[in-house]
Image: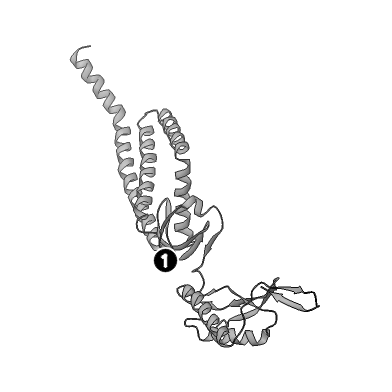
Amino acid sequence: MDVAGKMSLLIDTLITWAPKLVGAILVLLIGLWIIGMIVGMVRKAMEKSGLDQDVIPFLSSMISVLLKVMLVLSVAGMVGIETTSFVALIGMAGLAIGMALQGTLSHFAAGVMVLIFKPYRVGDLVDLQGQLGHVEEIQVFNTVIKSLDNKKVIVPNGIATSGIMTNLSSNEYLRVDLNVAMPYEEDFDKVQKIILDAIAQTPKVLRDPAPVVEIEKFDAHNVLLCVRPFATTADYWDVYFGTYKNVKAALGKHNIKVAYPRRDVMVGDGKLVSAN
């Protein structure tokens, strides 16, 4: 084929492909513009929803990449490029990556759910699978907790959300569960008043709801009383230790005996003797 023939073939090919190329370029440009608008709208929606600021860029970029891959595949199909093999290859790669990162992806999905539905927030006092402490950070894959003994505990989001989650900061106040052992020979009404007065003298105890002191059960050696003051989440441990301290001092002041194990022994002359 001479030069003129080659030029003619090239021109015919360009004429044949020109509409497809122009259309593909227009679709690509318009698609990129639309993707930019969609990503921007999604980003604003995530910001309004209160998602963690460190997570928003990650999610936005991930959405952008996925949409752009779909756009490129569509444009490739417009110009006549066979995309079936590309889709199959991407699918196989995605499957392999998904199987390799199955645990990590589950933690990521759980982290997204936490950030969206907010069962707990940064600063909340929570109990996640037995880990009690304040939430310091909610990351994409993990939740970082500062335990009450000042340890940094990292709980994978998949584990944190796989069971019962207790958020101790979700309500305005908490009940402080305490127990006091009372000897059987003591009068309950008297001891109840002494304990309630001691609770009233304890700083940071809430007056509403009112504290409760009642008989919980009868043990072998004493009567177990349930002592239930109420406190805000921030004051929980101050009330916990302060109440015990004041109750102990009040019982000692009123000569209330401390309950302890005892047994009665019958001696030879018929006398009943109590032994510790």
Q: In which quarter of the image is the N terminus?
A: top left
The answer to whether residue 139 is left or right of residue 222 is left
Q: Considering only vertical position in the picture, is 126 above or below 190?
A: above
Q: In which quarter of the image is the C terminus?
A: bottom right
Q: Amino acid type of disc 1?
A: Gly
Q: Considering only vertical position in the picture, is 145 above or below 171?
A: above
Provide residue 262's location: percent of width, then percent of height. Answer: 68, 73
> What number of labels is visible?
1
Q: Which residue lies furthest to the top in this view?
A: 1
Quadrant for residue 234, please give it: bottom left
Provide residue 84's location: percent of width, then percent of height. Answer: 43, 29
Along the line of sight, the residue nearer the viewer: 57 or 13: 57
Along the line of sight, the residue nearer the viewer: 6 or 124: 124
Quadrant for residue 196, please give it: bottom right
Q: Residue at x 22, y 15 (%)?
A: 5
* Disc 1 element: loop
Q: Mark 1 points at which residue?
A: 123
Q: Which residue lies furthest to the front in this view?
A: 269
Q: Considering only vertical position in the picture, is 90 above or below 214?
A: above
Quadrant for residue 186, please give it: bottom right
The answer to whether residue 159 is left or right of residue 49 is right
